[in-house]
Amino acid sequence: MKNQSRTIVLAAAQTGGHLLPAVETARVIREMGFATVMVTSGQAIEKEILKNSGMEVRTLHVQKINRMGVSGLVKGALSIPGALLASATMLREIRPAAVAGFGGFTSGPLVLAAQMMLIPTAVFEANSVPGITNRILARSARRVFVTFPSAGSRMGRKDFEVTGNPVRREILIHQRPEPAGPASRILVVGGSQGSRFLNQNVPKVAALLKDRIDGLVLRHQCGIGNSNAVAAEYRAAGVEAQATDYIHDMAEAMSWADFIICRSGAGTVGEVTAVGIPALFVPFALASDDHQAHNAMDLVRAGASLMKRESEFDPASVAAELAVIMRDPERLRAMSSAALAAGRRDAAQRIARGIVSMVKA
């Protein structure tokens, strides 16, 4: 499909880890004089994340391929022809100059349809271990962008570009004060959809910390529909905490916090390094190919963070370890500096320039 379009389509769905890098990249692309269209699957969390973005959003209904069972695989496979047809119809209507996939189950059929229609395509892989969809799409994509070098080699490409993971601009412009004393403010983030494991276990940790940390207070992003139950757990434990479904002003929350307990999706890891906040990562145990643990490894080795797998997360031992760290300003400063040193703050610009270069080539 050859045209003089100034529109670039970005496909992302399902989680903030897919959507937020696409939103930030789209912002830069628009500043370069192009129009953008975001294609999502229409889930509630997507609408929550995008409602203040000002972007044009289209919905592509795609059956998620569930690798956990035969019936899920069959249903997903049978939906592929219909998803490709719907994608091609949408692309013929939009007539984009390029299509970029940022992950989630709308990304696969839309990028594949674009490749079949000879529209230039790009793929962004946020995690250290790429999923099967991106490994397939990367074979024919004109540009491949990755957060971690290990992902590029696993995608079978030698010409991949290590860009880092785009972080929300409002987070980048916030400056966290350097730790000057003991920490008392903990931010808890279970990803954009929340984390049942953190919702159930962090209040237990806080209950054991409250008598060891003066002025302990928490902010906890719980996921849509979960904040009332989590708030009740904190109240029962006698801990001061603000539990919310979704934190829209994450920049302010990260600037406020002395320490973060979080999952280690690529987006969260990128934000931790962008602002230099000491972290305890708790990887999602069922993440495909254990990619969340791999995402956190470099920061753990650098001394920027701790990591506890779900299987080794004992509230008593976690509380004891956090109490030591949070009372040690020198350790907090060292962790903050190590996190900042590992971050890349220009990822959105790098990816946007790469996508636009396909149009101008």
Image: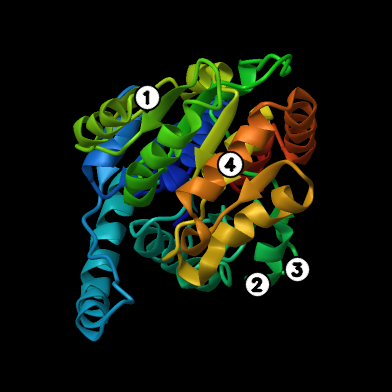
Q: Marks 1 and 4: in contact by CB < 8 Å?
A: no
Q: Which residue is tagged 2?
A: 154
Q: From the viewer's perspective, is the residue at label 2 or at label 1 nearer?
A: 1
Q: From the viewer's perspective, is the residue at label 2 or at label 3 nearer?
A: 2
Q: Residue at x 39, y 41 (%)?
A: 204
Q: Position of residue 281 (x, y in %)?
A: 56, 47
Q: Would residue 81 be seen by someone viewing this image from the given angle?
A: yes
* Picture disc at residue 320: 4
Category of crowding for the residue at label 1, using alpha-carbon neighbours closer than 10 angstroms: few (below 14), some (14–19), many (at least 20)? many
In front: 161, or 246?
246
Q: From the viewer's perspective, is the residue at label 3 or at label 4 nearer?
A: 4
Q: Residue at x 51, y 73 (%)?
A: 136
Q: Mark 1: which amino acid?
A: Val
Q: Position of residue 42 (x, y in %)?
A: 22, 45
Nearest to N terminus: mark 3 or mark 4? 3
Q: Mark 4: which amino acid?
A: Ala
